[in-house]
Amino acid sequence: ALISSKKNIRLFLDIRDIFVDTIGDLFKGFKGRIVVAIFSKIEKYTINRAQFLNVVSEGFINYFKKKYPLVKPVFFPNGIDDIFINTDFSIAKTHSRTILYAGNIGFGQGLQHIIPKMAQNLDRRWNIKIVGDGGNKIELIKEVKKLNLRNVTIVDPVIRNELIELYKSSEVLFLHLNQNQAFEKVLPSKIFEYGATGKPILAGVSGYAKKFIDREITNSKTFEPCNYDDAINSLYKLKLEFTDRDKFKKKYARDILSQGFAEEILGSLNNV
């Protein structure tokens, strides 16, 4: 924003997360208010300087409209990469009833609050596999060891080709967001990757992410974050079969979204 101002050129923003909103929920008390106050001024200057504002979640739109009435955000999400569009997941055969989570293991995911209790109460035929890394991985491992769980496997991140094979060999794909008000606005990019596989999806999300999954992705079930009873009940309601999500893939293919994104930017230039 500073550079665009000094150079007298237009600023186009693509908002992936709302830093001020998240910080405000994470840090309470006097110090938290100081941090929020400082970054709110930075946010205000940056947003008001922009001529174009895209958000990757429609859950962000009301936040910006309320704080910055003159701003008119548009919505273009992360979308699906070609490799997931072109891979045929329908021919894959699973060898065991595996629930797979692949991604970051941090505060935002809160896996330590759901995986151990969920695994402890699952039908014995089910296994849970966690693939990834992050700030809460050690805490998750400690909880799993504490309960002596033999149906949970936690491994390091893998390259994309190996990840695709893991998707193919898993029965259900798992997603979870921690209980936090700020997370009710987000739309995890993992949703698009999961949706493209045609695999059953079990998601512990609330707010906009829940609305999006319930509306857009067939053969998916959402449950209350950190509620293992609700998670298990939702799991047993899934159809353990491949689901053709061709419409979803066409609608959210990254190439299609990028084209629309570019046209929106060019349109805004023409209107200046």
Image (cartoon, grey):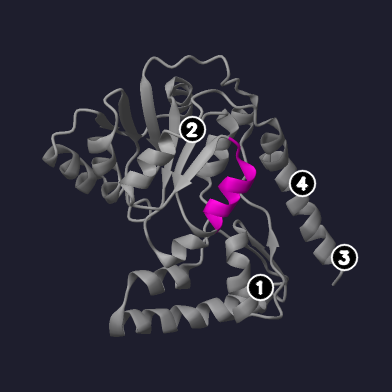
Q: CA distance from mark 4 to mark 2?
A: 34 Å
Q: Nearer the viewer, mark 4 or mark 3?
A: 4
Disc number for residue 259: 4
Report if residue 216 lies within the magenta region.
Answer: yes
Whichever of labels 3 and 1 marks the residue nearer the N terminus, that label is 1
- Percent x, y of residue 59: 58, 62
Circle 2: residue type? Leu
* Magenta-tinted stretch: 208-218
| Tag 4 secondary structure | helix
Q: Badge 2: few (under 14), some or many (20 or more) residues near its Cα, within 10 Å?
A: some
- Decide whether the magenta segment is chiefly helix, strand or loop: helix
Q: CA distance from mark 2 to mark 1?
A: 50 Å
Kindly indicate the quadrant of the structure image that contains residue 74: bottom right
- Percent x, y of residue 272: 84, 72
Whichever of labels 3 and 2 marks the residue nearer the N terminus, that label is 2
Disc number for residue 270: 3
Circle 1: residue type? Ser
Q: CA distance from mark 3 to mark 1?
A: 18 Å
Whichever of labels 4 and 1 marks the residue nearer the N terminus, that label is 1
